[in-house]
Every structure is written in structure tokens, then in C-alpha cells.
Amino acid sequence: MTQRETPARYGVTEQTVPGTDVERACEQIRHLGYGIIDGGYAQTWLTSLSAAFDRTRERYQSEYGGGEQLKAIDEHNTIRLPLAKEPMFLELATNSKVLEICSRLISGYAILNQQNGIINPPGAARYNQGAWHRDLPYQHFVSSRPLAINALFCLDAFTIENGATRVLPASHRQEAFPSDDFVEQHAATVTAPAGSFIVLDCMVFHGGGVNATASPRRGVNHVYSIPLIRQQIDLPHALGENFASDGKLRRLLGYDVRTPGTVAQYLAGRPRKS
């Protein structure tokens, strides 16, 4: 391997020195709004997850009225909360590298706000995630620290041909959506191998590219947010009280921050003073 030459500089007395892949990803997210990290999964596991994804999609469509019914509400290319159907998706949502990124970037602790299977359809078909958006949509403000992190798992390789994710670098630092000229000149396409996560500050503008191939491009999107932000689906209610017993997992899934239904429930949750 060729030794990389240190860039010339002067007047520099401080420098970030990332030592791990997590630290490098965090540096990229802070500056650009996005980064890529390998998920650390073996090919056999990815093959099993691929089968679980397709199986879950069939079951999901059957359970919620079929493909045409979901198409009528523009939900036919999305699988909501797959971890409720297949345990492999819960394993994906608790990836140690992704959770470490969240712990480094999000103040306090993060909860899983949502998990969705995403299908970018073949043949250059339109799909709802292809439009530019933030994963905290309709919000036009910036914060000094991320309020939420998006971890998009690449079940298939994300390539130029199959519509890899596009981003507007550093747009998490600006309140307004940039001009059309800026978008045309500065949009970046993020290609990534299967088994990796594309991790974004949720306020960076992004969207799926056009899939010009004959095969669907599949991913699993996760949003981890500060507990103050409401979950897309009430996970404790959807999963049931006995879904998880481990304290850390229950906190991640939002069991510790449920909204009390009554004053009595609120008071019961208050800690006693010694």
C-alpha cells in the first residue's frame, strides 16, 4: 500500500484524528451530512436477510390488502416495521456500529423512530422516496447537533445504474432547500456495496436515484432520533409489552418514553424522592 502524503498546511494547531471506521463515518456526517460504514455481516447472513426481505414483503402485502390496494396509497414499495415480522430485522436495527455512531452524534440517547423496507422499482419506475426530502420532513431549521440519524442498509449494492441514493452535501447546515442550479451542480450519488450502511444526518436532503436496471434495488431504512420526537409507529404498542425484556433494547424501542394515558399513569412513573 502506498503511503499517503500529508497535505501541506500552516497555522493549524488543532486537527480531528479519527482512528476507527466509526470515527471516520462520524467525521463525514458532521461535515458533509452523510457517510458509509460496513455493517460487518457475512455473506451467508446477507443471503438469509435477502430471503427474509422478500418473504416479509409478500406477507406484508397480503396482510394489508394486496399490491394494488397499497399502490392506491403509494405504499407498494415500502414495508413498514419489518422487525415485527422477522427477527433478523431486529438484529439489523441493533447493529453495534450504527448504535455507536448514534451515541457519538446524538446528545443523550436515541430511540428507534422507524424501520422501513424500501424497494426502488426497476425499469425507471417512479417511487415516493425518489423525491428530494429530509427524514424529518417539512422542517426548515438547523441544529448544532443531529436530532436524528438515518441508517440506510444496502441489502443490494447501490450503484449508479440501479438508482443509488443522491445527497446534497452539507445541506443539513442550511434551513432552506437550495436552488435548482445548486442541486444540478452539487448533488452527489452515494454508491455503496451490499452489506453497508449509508448513514445520514436526517436533516440532509437526499432521495433515491432512478433504477434503470431490470431488478429492484432493496434497502432497509432506519431512523434513530432523540426521545422527544414521536415515533412513526408506536413501537411498544405495535410490538406488545412482552416483545423484549432486555433493558437497553426496550429503551431503544421506546418503551421508556411512552406517553402516559392518564394523570395516574404519569404520577406512577415519577421517581420517589429519598
Image (spheres, rainbow, N blue to C red):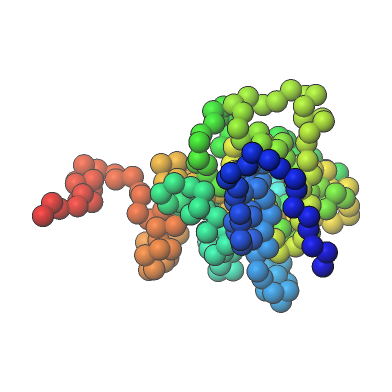
Q: Which residue lies furthest to the left in this view?
A: 274
Where does residue 214 sit, x and y in percent of width and height?
Answer: 89, 54
From the viewer's perspective, tell me whether residue 40 is left or right of residue 8.
left
Where does residue 230 sit, x and y in percent of width and height?
Answer: 45, 42
Between 21 and 123, the residue placed more toward the observer is: 21
Say if 149 sits above or below 246 in the image.
above
From the viewer's perspective, tell me whether residue 78 is left or right of residue 189.
left
Q: Which residue lies furthest to the front in this view?
A: 10
Quadrant of the rendered structure where residue 260 is? top left
Name which residue lies at 61% across and 56% down.
Answer: 18
Quadrant of the rendered structure where residue 62 is? bottom right
Name which residue lies at 70% across and 48% down.
Answer: 76
Q: Quadrant of the N terminus?
A: bottom right
Where does residue 229 sit, x and y in percent of width and height?
Answer: 45, 41
**Camera sees residue 133:** no
Name which residue lies at 75% across and 45% down.
Answer: 8
Between 263 and 190, the residue placed more toward the observer is: 190
Say if 181 sits above or below 217 in the image.
above
Q: Quadrant of the C terminus?
A: bottom left
Between 135 and 203, the residue placed more toward the observer is: 203
